[in-house]
Amino acid sequence: MTFRTDARLTPRQRLGRGLAHTAAGPVDIARGSLGLSAQSLCATASGIRRQYAKSQLRRELKAAQDVVARELAAAQDVVTSLPEVIADARKPKRSRRLLIVVSGVAVLGLGAITFSILRRSRQPEPSPLPPSVQVDPAP
């Protein structure tokens, strides 16, 4: 038993066979020419489709590059203004200084009052009785 498998001919093989065999030649030549034309048309369409996709990709890539360039410019502006922002943040506020000065003066004032009160409390109070010794020296 022999099995015969028909291998389909490609258009190129069909054209070659058609040119080689003159009896079935005109039919095979016509089919081969049509097949090669169809394959060429498909390849051309595929190439055009690929070129279109590449051009779309180029446009998208260009748009992405533009977006990245804008973002980098914005980031650069932020970075260049960063030292000024840090310097402004480090500057003590005027109201804060005033608060520190006022609180310092208040603490010193309270300390002076406390000191005078404590100093007076350590001194004995004068007696309401007249002194027993003559305070004024006699001449």
Image (cartoon, rainbow, N blue to C red):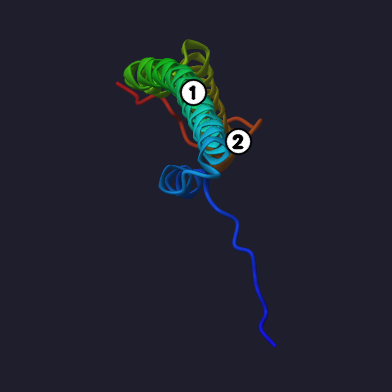
Q: What amino acid does circle 1 point to?
A: Ile
Tag 2, which secondary structure?
loop
Residue ranking furthest to the bottom: 1
Q: Is residue 131 visible?
A: no
Depth check: give the residue in front, 44 or 60.
Answer: 44
* Image x and y of residue 6, in percent: 64, 64
- Work out whether 71 lies above or below 5: above
Q: Position of residue 42 (x, y in %)?
A: 55, 31
Q: Say which residue appears at 39% left-offset and 21% top-offset.
A: 72
* Residue depicted at 34% across the width and 24% down the height: 138
Question: Which sits in the foreground, 71 or 114?
Answer: 71
Place residue 126 in its image quadrant. Answer: top right
Label number found at residue 137: none
> Residue sitting at 51 percent across and 41 percent down?
25
Q: Which mark lies nearer to you, 2 or 1?
A: 1
Residue 48 numbered mark, or none: 1
Q: Which residue is mark 2?
A: 125
State which quarter of the image contains the C terminus.
top left
Q: Amino acid at mark 2?
A: Glu
Q: Is residue 52 above or below residue 132?
A: above
Compared to 118, does 95 lie above or below? Answer: above
Residue furthest toward the left?
A: 139
- Residue at position x 36%, y 22% in the image: 79
